[in-house]
Amino acid sequence: MPFRKILDWIRNLFAKRKEIRLGIYGAVNVGKSTLANRIAKDWTGEEVSTVSEIPHETRFVQKKEKIEMKWNGKKLVINLLDMPGIATKVDYRDFMIYGLSRKEAKQRAKEATDGIIEAIKWLDNVDTVLAVMDATQDPLTQVNITLLGNLEARNIPVIIVANKIDLPTADPDAIKDAFPQYPVVPVSALTGKNIDKLYEAIFKHAKRRKKR
Amino acid sequence: MRLEMDFISSEAFAKKSMEERVKYIISNVKKNKIIVIGGTLPPKEEMKLVEETMKRIDEKFPGIEVCSLKKEESGYKAVFQKFVESIPRDKIAKILSWITKKEIKWENSLKDGITLIGPSTIIKKIKREKGYFKVLAEV
């Protein structure tokens, strides 16, 4: 029936509007894909990305759509976007240390640079960002500062995820001190430690942007 | 080996468009120069610099190292700074150009601070502290 079709179309239109594009951004090897997998597995039972110790494992935007999250009686539908790590340099020789051939390393470097460009372009299309930082490293890097500056300039809500708190050298307070104006949630994406706090923060801060 | 450094005032840089500035930085860094600017680029321009750098990476040019320190305003000055930054200058200039049929350029002023950009083959490490940064370079 045409009337029912119209009703379904309107319902779909509104259902779509409630979806939030949640982008996972950060420097290389801070645990973005591990976090994406943790979120996707917790809510859908399936992972979204492959993880590797070799830098730039995620070289294409990985998506997991229509993840339904429920928290304290509230519901949120997110489209999870695991972004390639942002970097200002990509040297193919760095990949050869991990045993890749020159040809493989060059191919990986080419894909990594394309991935960074893609991640930057996506900044205009995400609604909310999880800015992942490695809590064992100095947070005051240019990549972190440039990323947060861009999110602020675009009015994109951001939650800083201080990852890797399972490691003994982790210092999430250093991240809180460096960026006091943002909500910072210390987690271990690998073990799941404190992940509930992140879900609570997502429900509190995540929202759609007014303009796309 | 020689090391060349260019020091540029914010006034000189403000006269260039975003595209011209990014092009200037990358073309000079690719010549193994270190650029020091007497101000900081807007965040979107910094990201544009990263994007354009990625397009030009090859075997001899693996990328750049960047470090910027900007003067942080507080109180009402910080609110005013945010308001000024939120003005879409390029779009307004385009509309005014279209209305007046003349090319209108809105000067892209830089914020107070300092920025250093150099090739990653030369700049090995940057350590940032509150109010200053240290650069380790190897020629």
Image (cartoon, grey):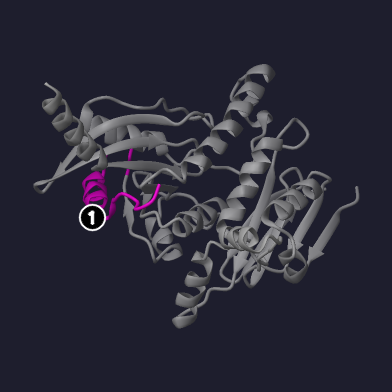
The percent position of residue B22, horizontal first and vertical second, equals: 70, 51
Q: Is residue A208 left or right of residue A56?
A: left
Kind of residue sitting beneath label 1: Lys
The percent position of residue B81, horizontal first and vertical second, equals: 51, 73
- Which chain is mark 1 on? A
The percent position of residue A34, horizontal first and vertical second, equals: 37, 34
For this rendering, which residue is in front, A3 or A52? A3
Q: Is residue A199 left or right of residue B117?
A: left
* Image quadrant assignment for residue A91: top right
Q: Which residues are magenta?
A: A188-212
Report whether residue A156 is seen.
yes
Residue A204 shown in magenta: yes
Residue A63 shown in magenta: no
Q: Is residue A137 left or right of residue A38?
A: right
| Residue at (47% x, 45% y) in the render | A123
The percent position of residue A95, horizontal first and vertical second, equals: 62, 27
The N terminus of chain A is located in which quarter?
A: top left
For this rendering, which residue is in front, B91 or B79? B91
The residue beneath circle 1 is A204
| Residue at (65% x, 38% y) in the render | B54
